[in-house]
Image: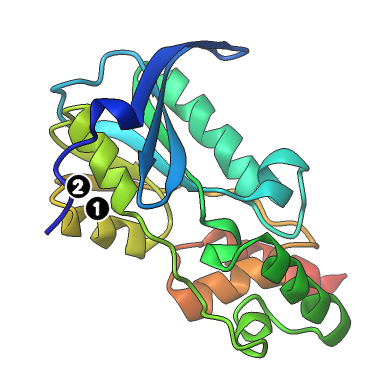
Amino acid sequence: MYEQAISDADVAESDLVTRRGRFRAVAFRSHGHEHMALTYGKIRMRENVLIRIHSECMTGDIFGAMRCECGEQLNAALDTIVREGSGILIYLRGHEGRGIGLVEKVRTHILQDEQGMDTLDSATSLGLPIDIRDYAPAGVVLRHLRVQSVRLLSNNPDKFKALEDQGIRVAGRVPLLIPPNDHNINYLTAKRDRLGHDLPQVEVFLPQAVDQ
């Protein structure tokens, strides 16, 4: 059974003025971590609210690492929400490296760089799980915000199912496609071919990479 509500002791809200405009910052504790939801415009009691569930990625979100598309997706999602006039970005902590943590993620990077392993094999070769992210906190905060239904900014079918499992009605999925680069094409290809992510831009990039 999914968690119904956040207690007053586990949530705090305030305005957050950013370069993109004024958001409402909703900090909340859930499932052992502190998370953040940024809301923009009118979203409470609304249908088909545009949302992004973003997994924490220090290397990509903060330092702009090019081996993933995380930082670019974060920025693109915020831009899209502002352009639409309303929406929510839910930033989930504890998701580093699809849940294995920062130290282990960096260890997988060594295997990727030195042995050519992809993002999945580099984890399993170290005895680590491929993906143990918990999306339940997203359902918790969406119920707190009294959102009626959502459109999900994502290429990952697992997020769609995770929200529905939390009792959130998903009206549709909106692609969030970032152009590949030479540093992340193998990563994106593995996500498409082995994790089932919808990444059609990979196919466009691959012939160019071969020609080079």
Q: Earlier in the sequence, mark 2 or mark 1?
A: 1
The location of residue 16, given as percent across then percent down, is: 51, 12
Q: Which quadrant holds the C terminus?
A: bottom right
Instruction: Identify residue type, mark 1.
Output: Leu
Instruction: Identify residue type, mark 2.
Output: Val
Mark 1 highlights which residue?
163
Q: Residues within 10 Å of mark 1 (few under 14, many from 20)?
A: many
From the viewer's perspective, is 150 left or right of 93? left
30 or 75, which is in the foreground? 30
Mark 2 highlights which residue?
170
Look at the numbered discs 2 and 1 and tell me whether their residues touch, using CB distance below 8 Å: yes
Which residue sits at x=44%, y=70%? 132
Label 1: element kind:
helix
Which residue sits at x=66%, y=42%? 61
Which residue sits at x=68%, y=48%? 58
From the viewer's perspective, is 118 left or right of 81? right
The location of residue 159, given as percent across then percent down, is: 34, 57
Does residue 206 sit above or below 34 in this rendering? Answer: below
From the viewer's perspective, is 85 left or right of 169? right
